[in-house]
Image (cartoon, rainbow, N blue to C red):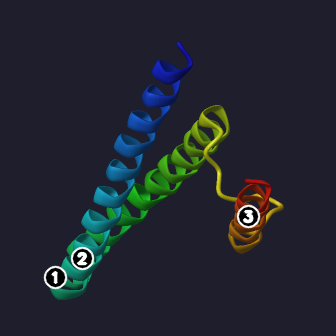
Amino acid sequence: MKKTITNLFANLYAWIAFLTMSLGLLTAVMFGASLVIGGSAGESVAVLAGNMMSWGIRFAAIAMVVGIVHTYAAKEHSLTLKSESKEVADKEIQNARVEEAM
């Protein structure tokens, strides 16, 4: 059950992040087109692109929340108090002690 939920959150995050990136690309193209068009028509396109970008920001915030929930539900976050080099050193010390005991 837990794996199914984490997979659901991972897929949901991926789709929302893809949607956000697509909206960002479309907004950039629309702003570029508004510069080329100019005048009141270009202004209208730029206003529409600005409205789309506000939706993109909302989707990005939703994706961030879904990603955080997935990270902590899967217990796969990389922000820990131990550093990786300390963990490797501890394992090497443990292996050396095991070899000495043999």
Camera-side residue: 4 or 82?
A: 82
Q: Secondary structure at mark 1?
A: helix
Q: Name the residue at 44% across, 26% down.
A: 8
Q: Name the residue at 24% across, 78% down.
A: 34
Mark seen at residue 37: 1
Q: Secondary structure at mark 2?
A: helix
The residue that disc 3 covers is: 87
Q: Name the residue type under label 3.
A: Glu
Is 21 positioned to the left or the right of 81 in the image? left
Res 30 → quadrant: bottom left
Q: Do residues under tags 1 and 3 come within 8 Å of each other at their CB atoms?
A: no
Is 32 positioned to the left or the right of 93 in the image? left
Q: CA distance from mark 2 to mark 3?
A: 57 Å
The residue that disc 2 covers is: 42
Q: Closer to the camera: disc 1 or disc 3?
A: 3
Q: Name the residue type under label 2.
A: Gly
Q: CA distance from mark 2 to mark 1?
A: 5 Å
Res 84 → quadrant: bottom right
Q: Secondary structure at mark 3?
A: helix
Res 10 → quadrant: top left
Q: Name the residue at 28% across, 57% down.
A: 22
